[in-house]
Image (cartoon, grey):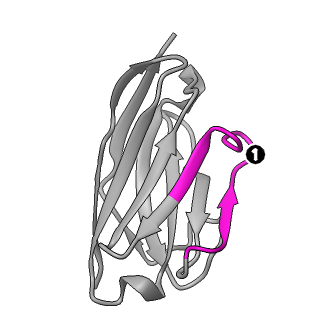
Amino acid sequence: QVQLVESGGGLVQAGGSLRLSCAASTRTFGTYAMGWFRQAPGKSREFVAAIGWGGGATLYADSVKGRFTISRDARKTVSLQMNSLKPEDTAVYYCAAGSQLVTTPVYDYWGQGTQVTVSS
């Protein structure tokens, strides 16, 4: 069982930055691909970014390429640096862990989510 706890969400003005973190409680953190997804009110959960178990492979949604950066470290944390935020980035952001590096929400473990609100 893997527990994931997100932090770092909040309210920011358009053009600003936030850094989300996800702490994983597992000894086998290095064997999981990690992803970030988001869900806005009335919309389905959508892929944002993902990183492979070794950290060398990353995937990004077209809507965030060049603005968001995903990273992971040996302290069992995966981060999402979000720059140049837009009002349309407003959503609950979820961290996920799984066995495959994919863009679909088929990851095995999910956090509770953290709210990101971008004001115009």
- Can residue 64 be found in the magenta stretch? yes
Left or right: 4 as drawn, with respect to 85: left
At x 33%, y 38%, the residue is 9
Q: Which x, y percent locates residue 56?
A: 63, 74
Q: Which x, y percent locates residue 43?
A: 56, 39
At x 43%, y 46%, the residue is 93
Q: Is residue 92 shown above or below 119?
A: below
Q: Main secondary structure of the magenta part?
A: loop
In the structure shown, which secondary structural element does the residue marked by tag 1 occupy?
Answer: loop
Q: Which x, y percent locates residue 31?
A: 46, 88
Left or right: 49 as drawn, with respect to 65: left
Q: Is residue 80 shown above or below 30?
A: above
Callout 1 crowding tier (Cα within 10 Å): few <14, some 14–19, many ≥20:
few
Identify residue for label 1. 62
| Front residue of 64 and 92 | 64
Q: Is residue 26 shown above or below 119?
A: below
At x 35%, y 37%, the residue is 115
At x 42%, y 54%, the residue is 94
Q: Which residues are magenta?
A: 55-70
Q: Which x, y percent locates residue 8?
A: 30, 42
Q: Residue furthest top?
A: 120
Q: Quadrant of the N terminus?
A: bottom left
Left or right: 81 as drawn, with respect to 50: left
Residue 12 placement: quadrant: top left
Residue type at the position of mark 1: Asp
Residue 87 placement: quadrant: top right
- Can residue 88 be found in the magenta stretch? no
- The number of discs equals 1
Left or right: 18 as drawn, with respect to 102: left
